[in-house]
Image: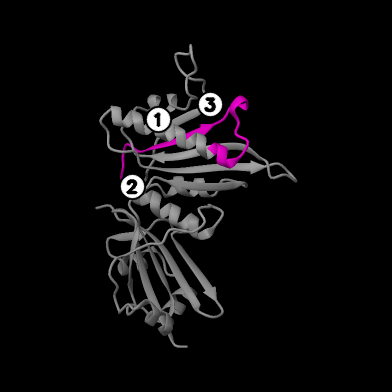
């Protein structure tokens, strides 16, 4: 079946985008019903929200950059459990984290702040020869506005009768999100690549979703094969995408070969500073 090269630009905020250049068949094009250059299309959310899955990891990074990469007050919250309150399952931990996020949202509402936006990552390891989770903890990226001390203090149980405030669930630390010239890609990659264990993520429903556009006439197989063989440097791609540059010389570009479809190129780009 005849194939051609498709360029797919994925828009993830004002300072970060990804570009896929890959082989596409005439049959796929007909089924999709699209012409040479498509309209905006929302990127599909992964079915499995597990960061051990390649597609979920990629979408997670896109979503994080789009919603928090340009927020100078966004926070990265790390929350752990003391032995007394250690959850028995991932599901119990996620319920605890959800209750915490409700308290954060209530505090934001009282303070007259916009609604809470967040991405929650629940991570754990398991004992050898057992499915029982250990070292359960959470990483939460949320929009800014509340004082960091307030965000940390809310990681408590509901107060019981006679208590001024509920027991601490464990350790909680809120840091200003350290966005750099690549947005929050470094944090997203850190959360994705923590050693071992399971990592599941959820998010608030009010997040912006990345979208994409495709172009079927920009490149051909011979060009892509030549570039995959020669591996041109950063300046080459800056000419192809004016105003943008690779996020990193090593990880900003990936070349992949498939026996059936040939070469594909995947770019991670950041907006060049003026």
Residue 146 appears in the rendering:
no
Q: Position of residue 252 (x, y in %)?
A: 43, 59
Residue shown at 31% from the left, 53% from the top: 13
Residue denoted by label 2: 206
Q: Position of residue 227 (x, y in %)?
A: 44, 75
Front label number (3 vs 1): 1
Residue shown at 29% from the left, 73% from the top: 38
| Residue 119 versus residue 227 in the image, above or below | above
Q: Earlier in the sequence, mark 3 or mark 1?
A: 1
Residue denoted by label 1: 103
Q: Position of residue 156 (x, y in %)?
A: 48, 25
| Residue 157 versus residue 15 in the image, above or below | above
Quarter of image, res 72: top left
| Residue 217 versus residue 99 in the image, above or below | below
- Count of marks placed on residues: 3
Q: Secondary structure at mark 1?
A: helix
Q: What stretch of residues is rendered in magenta?
A: 69-93
Q: Earlier in the sequence, mark 2 or mark 1?
A: 1
Question: Which scheme is used to colour this image of the protein?
Answer: one colour
Outermost residue to the right: 129
Magenta stretch: residue 135 in it?
no
Residue at mark 3 to residue at mark 1: CA–CA distance = 14 Å
Residue shown at 40% from the left, 47% from the top: 184
Magenta stretch: residue 76 in it?
yes
Q: Is residue 107 left or right of residue 123?
A: left
Q: Position of residue 264 (x, y in %)?
A: 47, 73
Other residues around mark 1 within 10 Å, as few (<14) / some (14–19) / many (≥20): some
Residue denoted by label 3: 169
Verify CB contact (< 8 Å) between mark 2 and mark 3.
Answer: no
Residue at mark 2 to residue at mark 3: CA–CA distance = 27 Å
Other residues around mark 2 within 10 Å, as few (<14) / some (14–19) / many (≥20): few
Other residues around mark 3 within 10 Å, as few (<14) / some (14–19) / many (≥20): many
């Amino acid at each position: 079946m005849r194939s051609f090269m498709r360029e797919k630009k994925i828009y993830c905020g004002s300072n970060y985008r990804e570009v896929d250049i890959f082989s596409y068949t005439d049959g796929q094009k007909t089924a999709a019903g699209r012409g040479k250059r498509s309209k905006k299309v929302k990127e599909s959310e992964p079915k499995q929200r597990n960061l051990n899955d390649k597609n979920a990891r990629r979408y997670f990074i896109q979503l994080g950059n789009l919603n928090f990469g340009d927020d100078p007050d966004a926070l990265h919250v790390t929350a752990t459990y003391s032995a007394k309150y250690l959850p028995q399952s991932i599901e119990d931990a996620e319920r605890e984290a959800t209750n915490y996020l409700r308290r954060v949202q209530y505090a934001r509402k009282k303070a007259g702040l916009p609604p809470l936006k967040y991405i929650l990552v629940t991570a754990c390891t398991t004992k050898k020869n057992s499915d029982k989770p250990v070292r359960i903890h959470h990483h939460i990226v949320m929009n800014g506005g509340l004082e960091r001390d307030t965000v940390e203090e809310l990681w408590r149980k509901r107060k019981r009768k006679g208590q001024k405030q509920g027991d601490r669930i464990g350790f909680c630390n809120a840091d200003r999100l350290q966005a750099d010239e690549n947005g929050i890609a470094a944090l997203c990659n850190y959360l994705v690549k923590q050693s071992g264990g399971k990592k599941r993520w959820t998010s608030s429903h009010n997040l912006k979703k990345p979208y994409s556009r495709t172009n079927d006439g920009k490149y051909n197989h011979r060009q892509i094969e030549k570039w995959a063989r020669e591996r041109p440097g950063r300046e080459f791609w800056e000419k192809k995408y004016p105003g943008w540059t690779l996020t990193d010389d090593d990880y900003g570009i990936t070349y992949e070969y498939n026996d059936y479809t040939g070469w594909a190129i995947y770019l991670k780009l950041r907006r060049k500073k003026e």
